[in-house]
């Protein structure tokens, strides 16, 4: 709770007004996240305490999670903390916990959550961890990761300046494609990561990532090479680096996709920190 500018404790009326304003902010924030589906976890119960929904408040159409709202009013300085909690990557990771929401947990070694700053101008989304990632716990660390690093550097960025994640956070056995129930269980966490990272442009790597994020079922050849919209964010599908290692003649097309991303970031006023490769 804040104090007056001269350090005196606030009057009771000021406290009530401040709490009411904070509760309004929290209600709006929770409503936004609920509409975005950020905390819907179809694969199993969330470790976060379940809020009991009350009827919509007078004059609003958004259901109010009454337990969380009551908690916000009861705590000393809750809304900033709670707002940070529902948005921060650290809290999303905490929410994920030692996840057993889908069967991939049975064979994984490490959860590969994602790496990068928050926020990040540029976000890359792949399909799922491979053997190296499963062993180390970071995305794109094997041969495909080395190629992704080169692609990022050619764009004028460094790996630690962009955010990198996958649509599932545990390795599918034998590097098979993730199955629909696994994707559904993990998807809320990817959505929450995108909300936290707030990228200006997303680059999806390979068909599964593009199809899952865009909600389509189409070959990568029909998706790549042009921008799509993902909830107001520009999204460019391109080939997965592992595919490019097997099919190097496609690297030219992939670079063409990335050059469009470079141009789009320029247009958006958030150019690469260093000159991209010509
Ligand atoms: Fe949980 Fe996602 Fe791993 Fe499935 S893939 S166990 S939902 S973290």
Image: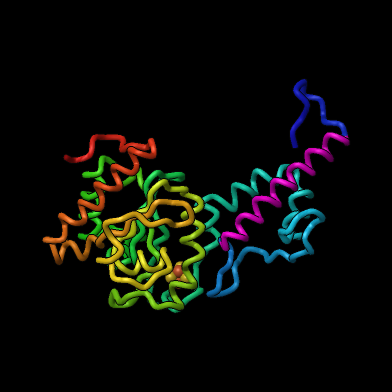
Residue 6 percent coordinates (x, y): 77, 20
Residue 181 percent coordinates (x, y): 46, 78
Residue at the spot 25% in from the left edge and 66% down from the top edge:
221
Position of residue 233 relative to residue 35, above or below, is above
- For the record, the magenta segment spans 12-37
* Residue 128 shows in this picture: no
Residue 197 percent coordinates (x, y): 46, 49
- Which quarter of the image is occupied by the C terminus? top left
Q: How is the image coloured?
A: rainbow
Quadrant in which ligand 1 is drawn: bottom left
The quadrant holding residue 239 is bottom left
Q: Looking at the image, which residue sits at the far right? A: 12
Position of residue 268 relative to residue 202, above or below, is above
Magenta stretch: helix, strand or loop mostly: helix
Q: Looking at the image, which residue sits at the far left? A: 249
| Residue situated in front as seen by the camera: 12 or 201 | 201
- Which quarter of the image is occupied by the N terminus? top right
| Magenta stretch holds residue 36 | yes
| Residue situated in front as seen by the camera: 150 or 260 | 260
* Residue 161 shows in this picture: yes
| Residue situated in front as seen by the camera: 162 or 3 | 162
Residue at the spot 15% in from the left edge and 66% down from the top edge:
246
Position of residue 236 relative to residue 209, above or below, is above
- Left or right: where 85 falls relative to 208: right
| Magenta stretch holds residue 103 | no
Residue at the spot 88% in from the left edge and 35% down from the top edge:
13
């Amino acid at each position: 709770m804040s104090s007056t500018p001269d350090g005196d404790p606030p009057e009771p009326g000021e406290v009530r007004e401040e709490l009411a304003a904070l509760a309004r902010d929290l209600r709006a924030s929770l409503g936004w996240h609920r509409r975005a589906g950020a905390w819907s976890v179809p694969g199993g119960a969330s470790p976060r305490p379940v809020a009991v929904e009350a009827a919509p408040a007078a004059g609003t159409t958004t259901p109010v999670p009454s337990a969380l709202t009551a908690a916000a009013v009861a705590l000393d300085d809750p809304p900033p903390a709670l707002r940070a909690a529902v948005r921060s990557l650290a809290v999303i990771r905490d929410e994920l916990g030692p996840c057993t929401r889908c069967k991939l947990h049975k064979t994984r070694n490490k959860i590969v959550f994602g790496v990068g700053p928050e926020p990040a101008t540029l976000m890359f989304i792949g399909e799922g961890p491979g053997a190296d990632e499963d062993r180390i716990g970071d995305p794109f660390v094997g041969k495909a990761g080395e190629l992704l690093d080169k692609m990022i550097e050619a764009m004028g960025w460094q790996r630690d300046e962009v955010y990198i994640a996958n649509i599932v956070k545990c390795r599918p056995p034998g590097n098979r494609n993730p199955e629909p129930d696994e994707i559904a269980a993990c998807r809320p966490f990817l959505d929450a990561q995108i909300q936290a990272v707030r990228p200006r442009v997303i680059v999806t790597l390979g068909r599964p990532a593009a199809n899952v994020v865009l909600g389509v079922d189409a070959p990568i050849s029909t998706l790549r090479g042009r921008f799509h919209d993902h909830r107001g964010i520009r999204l460019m599908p391109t080939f997965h680096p592992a595919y490019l290692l097997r099919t190097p003649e496609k690297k030219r097309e992939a670079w063409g996709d990335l050059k469009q991303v470079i141009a789009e970031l320029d247009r958006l006023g958030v150019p690469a920190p260093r000159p991209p490769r010509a």
